[in-house]
């Protein structure tokens, strides 16, 4: 049965009561993050229904695990396949909470929206049919290909202030622009919640970002997050929620705020959030949700940090950063990392010094982080100035609108026409080149070249699969302007263009309204609501399919210590999920674990071999290096487990649980790293791989190519207890090193059971056998 629509009046009444109860209990003012988390904590033994359960005690200790009950779950088509395959292996008959699935990642950019969509429907029919049937079965709303990118659609339709949302995509924090606490998770977390369990989260620290002033000229919300990326780096937000406050917030639209919270995924924060106010309400009106705004208005004070927090932020946030929007310059990030940022005016000199290819080969605007009506409006304003003087983009320029609603409204406003007038190709409302779904045809692609986009990630190989492409990030308006210059070293704020008639053209700063006067044109087409009863719907997977395969449970751990594990890979430097399980062409195998496992660690740089993605066979060290997936399969066939050694922020980037399931499927027992990205670490725990952290980061250097590694005393594994690891070197010597871990009692049980899903299904079976527990 579909879930009943949100009752905003009941939600906000209850929200306020819970916030008040929590404040009384902890006896101090609360941040917005704390309010939303406390309002969604579950106390064992109480009904889970939001309206029924009072909020529980929490001592708000950083890092302590709490059980939360989210209001909604969002899935997309490539991570969603694994979620639904896991759900099929439980006894669940219907998703326990409202959920939507969005078809956005599989649509490849080739010729433009129409043909690309038709191509995707043909090529991915089997997967779309599977997703449709599984959504119908579990009562999940299905958003068809073309309806939009998950985070823009969630913002437009289902997110609401004060909500706790989880989504199987790292950019789920986008909804923080509308004052929801929206957290990117791996599929395993979504399965737990859809199956009726809790979302287990380590209590985050708080980073407060105080905004003052108003953006000027070419500066935009993208520059706020790019600036912040420079301050925090790709790890600076780890374990924290970034909460914005201060008078500058009022000058940003909800979609502009969403750009900032979306890209917060790049500094590793659990999520980011803005307070609720008139701009958020305006967005609710524009997306046909006046009733939600009216109800939220009744408890607006509970949808922002308490006044005492705002007066003394240093007392209540672990760190406070101040950004003055009046003086903020437009920024550009890149290449290869989103935290390599600088004001545009500094890039010219750097291009020369670093010998970055100056000629831009492609420019792209859109992606979930910058594809709103306002974004397209500002880009179109630049395009209009150029078109009026007969200028065209000097490089191919691609545009991905965020949703069908944005596209339609932008079309009506003339934005699409303005962009097409300078030569832009408008692609489907989908991820496309942002995730390597891009049939790049320009000649520039064949060697080192520079591309510029308004996307959020720029890891090597991400967009076009070519590690030699240098990818830079900026706001949509800056990308559009730079496309007119065709040069990376151009500064559209100061440089001039020459029109075909010889006249000098100086682009003036972009201007556009945040929202159309009559609201966004949201159509009812594009989504399929589930039937009242889907229990009898059959979800068919063809036995010979290379796209989908039912999941076999991972074997439980046998209780023995790990002994003599070879080191499959010692990753050097950045090892993102794009290095561990690349996307692009591999996205088609996201529903087939064994097939996609062939790409495992394909992009990882191994300390022991010259070519990324390869490793040395410890059983035949003189043989040539092999593909890591082949080597892992070989060890597995020989009955040998193995481990991986990683550097800092291991598994940075996406939420894809494939990056944990694939190694597990191929026999990975443990990963020892200098540190993990939050979602990847959670995914490893969920799928029964032991994530260990070098207590002394320098011990990373002790690991040698042909070492065999023991992890003794696994039976003693306990929360907060260090774990000894023994490195046995080939010269007969050994070294004992100390590792830490962040496993809770429950997560240790998952490890022993082989995975959290094994643990869940065992629990379900026990519950079914014992009527007294049902
Ligand atoms: C991404 O931007 O990397 C993705 C593709 O959206 C991923 C999800 C995935 O790998 O399916 C993410 O960010 O979580
Ligand atoms: Fe899609 Fe790119 Fe956003 Fe990921 S970051 S959801 S691939 S648009």
Image (cartoon, rainbow, N blue to C red):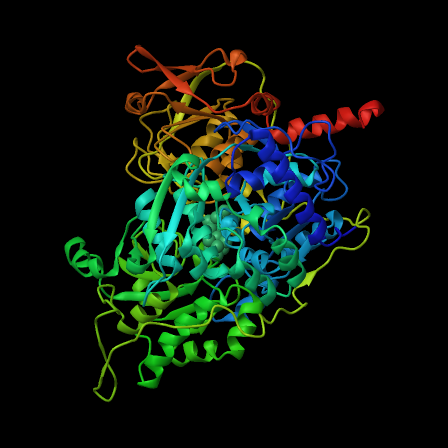
Q: Position of residue 527 (x, y in %)?
A: 67, 62
Q: Nearer the viewer, residue 31 or 86?
A: 31
Q: Quadrant of the C terminus?
A: top right
In the picture, measured across the screen, residue 523 lies left or right of residue 222, that is: right
Q: Nearer the viewer, residue 520 or 698?
A: 520
Q: Position of residue 322 (x, y in %)?
A: 34, 47
Q: Position of residue 618 (x, y in %)?
A: 37, 23
Residue occupying the point 33% across, 61% down:
452
Please say if 707 is above or below 209.
Answer: above
> How many numbered discs sit on the rendered protein?
0
Which quarter of the figure has residue 508? Answer: bottom left
Farthest residue in the right direction?
A: 771
Q: Position of residue 587 (x, y in %)?
A: 51, 51
In the picture, measured across the screen, residue 401 lies left or right of residue 45, that is: left
Residue occupying the point 58% across, 74% down:
518
Please say if 491 is above or below 341.
Answer: below
Residue 185 in sight here: yes
Residue 369 in sight here: no
Q: Nearer the viewer, residue 392 or 324?
A: 324
Q: Nearer the viewer, residue 85 or 6?
A: 6
Please say if 526 is above or below 27.
Answer: below
Which quarter of the figure has residue 594? Answer: top right
In the picture, measured across the screen, residue 494 lies left or right of residue 379, that is: left
């Amino acid at each position: 049965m579909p879930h009943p629509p949100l009752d905003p009046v009941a939600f906000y009444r209850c929200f306020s009561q819970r916030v008040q109860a929590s404040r009384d209990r902890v006896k101090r003012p609360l941040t917005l993050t704390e309010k939303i988390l406390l309002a969604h904590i579950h106390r064992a033994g109480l009904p889970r229904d939001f309206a029924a359960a009072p909020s529980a005690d929490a001592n708000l200790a950083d890092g302590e695990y709490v059980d939360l009950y989210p209001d909604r779950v969002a899935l997309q088509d490539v991570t969603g396949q694994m979620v639904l395959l896991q759900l099929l292996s439980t006894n669940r008959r219907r998703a326990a909470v409202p959920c939507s699935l969005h078809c956005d990642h599989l649509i490849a950019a080739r010729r433009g929206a129409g043909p690309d969509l038709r191509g995707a429907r043909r090529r991915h029919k089997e997967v779309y049919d599977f997703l449709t049937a599984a959504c119908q079965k579990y009562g999940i709303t299905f958003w068809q290909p073309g309806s939009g990118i998950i985070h823009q659609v969630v913002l437009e339709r289902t997110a609401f202030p004060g909500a706790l949302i989880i989504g199987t995509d790292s950019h789920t924090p986008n909804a923080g622009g509308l004052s929801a606490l929206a957290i990117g998770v791996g599929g395993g977390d979504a399965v737990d919640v859809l199956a009726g369990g809790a979302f287990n989260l380590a209590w985050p620290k708080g980073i407060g970002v105080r905004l003052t002033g108003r953006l000027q000229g070419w500066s935009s919300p993208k520059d706020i997050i790019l600036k912040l990326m420079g301050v925090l780096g790709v790890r600076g937000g780890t374990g924290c929620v970034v909460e914005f406050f201060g008078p500058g917030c009022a000058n940003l639209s909800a979609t502009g705020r969403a750009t900032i919270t979306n890209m917060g995924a790049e500094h590793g924060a659990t999520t980011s959030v803005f307070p609720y106010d008139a701009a958020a309400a305006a967005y609710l009106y524009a997306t046909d949700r006046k009733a939600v705004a009216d109800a939220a208005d009744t408890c607006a004070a509970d949808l922002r940090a308490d006044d005492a927090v705002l007066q003394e932020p240093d007392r209540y946030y672990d760190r406070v950063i101040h950004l003055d929007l009046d003086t903020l310059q437009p920024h550009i990030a890149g290449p290869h990392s989103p935290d390599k940022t600088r004001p545009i005016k500094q890039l010219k000199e750097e291009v020369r010094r670093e010998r970055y290819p100056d000629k831009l080969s492609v420019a792209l605007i859109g992606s979930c982080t910058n594809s709103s009506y306002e974004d397209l409006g500002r880009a179109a304003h630049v395009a209009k100035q150029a078109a009026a003087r007969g200028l065209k983009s000097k490089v191919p320029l691609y545009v991905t609108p965020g949703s069908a609603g944005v596209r339609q409204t932008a079309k009506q406003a003339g934005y699409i026409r303005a962009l097409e007038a300078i030569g832009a190709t408008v692609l489907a409302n989908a991820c496309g080149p942002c995730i390597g779904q891009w049939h790049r045809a320009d000649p520039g692609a064949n060697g080192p070249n520079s591309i510029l986009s308004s996307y959020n990630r720029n890891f090597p190989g991400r967009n076009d699969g070519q590690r030699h492409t240098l990818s830079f990030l900026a706001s949509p308006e800056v990308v559009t302007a730079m496309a007119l210059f065709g040069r990376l070293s151009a500064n559209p704020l100061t440089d001039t263009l020459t029109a075909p008639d010889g006249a000098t053209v100086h682009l003036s700063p972009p201007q556009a309204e945040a929202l159309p006067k009559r609201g966004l044109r949201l159509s009812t087409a594009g989504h399929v609501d589930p039937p009242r009863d889907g229990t009898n719907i059959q979800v068919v997977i063809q036995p010979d399919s290379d796209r989908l395969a039912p999941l076999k449970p991972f074997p439980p751990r046998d209780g023995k210590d790990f002994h003599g594990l070879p080191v499959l890979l010692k990753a050097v430097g950045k090892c993102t999920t794009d290095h561990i399980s690349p996307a692009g062409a591999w996205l088609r195998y996201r529903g087939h674990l064994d097939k996609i496992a062939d790409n495992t660690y394909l992009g990882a740089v191994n300390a022991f071999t010259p070519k990324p993605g390869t490793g040395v066979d410890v059983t035949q060290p003189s043989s040539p290096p092999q593909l890591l997936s082949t080597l892992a399969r070989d060890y597995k066939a020989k009955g040998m487990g193995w481990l991986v050694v990683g550097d800092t922020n291991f598994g940075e980037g996406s939420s894809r649980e494939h990056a944990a399931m694939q190694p597990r499927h191929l026999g990975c027992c443990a990963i020892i790293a200098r540190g993990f990205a939050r979602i990847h670490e959670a995914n490893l725990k969920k799928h029964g791989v032991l994530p260990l952290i070098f207590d002394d980061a320098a011990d990373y250097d002790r690991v040698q190519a042909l070492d065999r590694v023991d992890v003794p005393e696994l039976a003693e594994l306990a929360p907060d207890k260090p774990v000894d690891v023994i490195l046995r070197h080939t010269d007969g010597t050994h070294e004992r090193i100390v590792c830490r871990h962040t496993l809770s009692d429950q997560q240790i049980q998952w490890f022993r059971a082989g995975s959290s899903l094994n643990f869940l299904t065992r629990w379900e079976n026990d519950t079914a056998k014992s009527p007294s527990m049902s």
